[in-house]
Amino acid sequence: VRNLRGSRGSRNVFFGVAPQKGLCVTAAGTVVHGKLEGGKRVVKGMRSFEEIPHTGRNGWLNLLKFWRENRFQQLHKHMERTFNTLGPIYREKLGTLSSVNIMLPSDVSELFKSEGLHPRRMTLQPWATHREIRNHSKGIFLKNGEEWRADRLQLNKEVMMSAAVKRFLPLLDEVAKDFCRMLQTRMEKEGRGEEGKCVLTIDPSPDLFRFALEASCHVLYGERIGLFSSSPSLESQKFIWAVERMLTTTPPLLYLPPRLLLRMGAPLWTQHATAWDHIFSHAEARIQRGYQRLSTSLGRASPTGTAGGHYTGVLGQLMEKGQLSLDLIKANITELMAGGVDTTAVPLQFALFELGRNPEVQESVRQQVRASWAQAGGDPQKALQGAPLLKGTIKEVLRLYPVGITVQRYPVRDIVLQNYHIPAGTLVQACIYPMGRSEKVFEDPLHFDPSRWSREEGQRAEAAGFRSLAFGFGARQCVGRRIAENEMQLLLMHILLSFHLSVPSSEDLNTTVTLILQPETPPRITFSKL
């Protein structure tokens, strides 16, 4: 990361382009310092869509260049270089996919003002095609319009609302504590050093993947699946492998017609579909077991979503409410399972690495965690509320290493970005990896500083909000956000209460993109018992 530092440019000019003032399309659809003519927005000096800087007009040649130069795996770096070359907005066409890419918070703000009642993001067509050819129902990730909104509102009640968080937080806390007990046992068996001074240096990524799946299943099904035992199930490990294969094969398929590849019997499509088949098979088996268990117990369920005093998980909550069909419940639970492993396990790798190579930051967070834990009386919610640096740590990790490197929207009306006309229905991508590392957006952007987010609380919400977009924004933000945020914070809290972290090497991590950003080689972490 450090070797990417550039010289500081003028604070008043972005990439050599003077900031455009007074060109905002308001939420009401009017133009400030402009006018409406014939139903079209006209701004003095506004430039046409075709004038937006671009990376080449031939999408197929661009796609060929991407494959030949292995740019899919380095898409985040490609975006960063392109912004540095072309400025804060550019067009790109790859195969069948065309987009406008932006990275300044002011432009992102304008984009989200025009997202409408039913926000749309880029459809992952390979995923949608798989559901269609296998006759699976689609979950909210693949839906749009009123159908999406109706299902999303039901899911929000069980995974996003504060009452739901209060129900599942103890389950996440239990798994986080068990992870630390497992790590302590491993340290006693494999650690080196004098008695009481044992240290253990490992690649924690396999354990973090197991933690993420165990925690997700505990919340979704209300039961443990035993991944911390001495012999975790091979079936669960195969599920993790299938998720990784699905993520790896998705990006190349985004730029080609999936049904054409299906008819051709292309190996890439076969690998992708097979991975999804295994994910659905694993989820189906767990859902069926949960359904059978819950069918006998829901008659005794209390109004708070517990059966016989036991929280029945998101699955049980949705079944009890009866607002979604069983097929839709299965579709959404499967999506939550598939989306809840790598997307938390990988940021936790980055978090342990950054805390390990920034010991002063680590100690500041630990001191706050210790004080909060001592006052919380074992209540995980109170403990997290009293340790804002934990939340800041997650935000800072996701600023430097966002899971998804873009957030997409299709504006429902014409808008103006950087004085360029953007027609309604254009795919616009907010590129959050370049944003998070830009001196135009963050002071000393390559410095890992969780406290920067506490300092920003005094700023206007809009200015701060569009600088932290790892979970998306608004009605279409990540539906598993509350699960993921709390899962990662609780694990870091218990690790910091039990262990000191260091790293054998503090060299910057090389990163690669599958569908998500991850380290090329997982970092090794040294755990020392406090």
Image: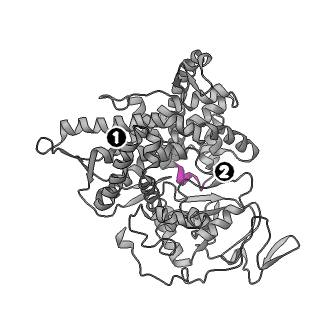
* The one of 476 and 89 positioned closer to us in this rendering: 476
Residue 195 location (% of width, % of height): 12, 41
Residue 90 location (% of width, % of height): 61, 72
Whether 344 is drawn above or below 226: the answer is below
- Which residue is located at x 52 percent, y 29 percent? 221
Q: Amino acid at mark 2?
A: Ala
Residue 88 location (% of width, % of height): 58, 74
| Magenta part of the chain | 250-256
Whether 416 is drawn above or below 239: the answer is below
Residue 114 location (% of width, % of height): 72, 62
Residue 186, image quadrant: top left
Whether 315 is drawn above or below 76: the answer is above
**Along the horizontal axis of the image, is 293 left or right of 131?**
left
**Which residue position is annotated with label 2?**
475
Q: Pointer 1: residues within 10 angstroms few (<14), some, or many (20+)?
A: some
* Quarter occupied by the N terminus: bottom left
* The one of 460 and 295 positioned closer to us in this rendering: 460
**Along the horizontal axis of the image, is 126 left or right of 148?**
left
- Which residue is located at x 61 percent, y 40 percent? 130
Determine if the magenta segment contains residue 255: yes
Residue farthest left in this picture: 194
Q: Earlier in the sequence, mark 2 or mark 1?
A: 1
- Residue 207 is marked as 1
Q: Amino acid at mark 1?
A: Asp
Whether 470 is drawn above or below 83: the answer is above
Determine if the magenta segment contains residue 129: no
User: Dot 1: what SS?
Assistant: helix
Image depth: mark 2 or mark 1 in front: 2
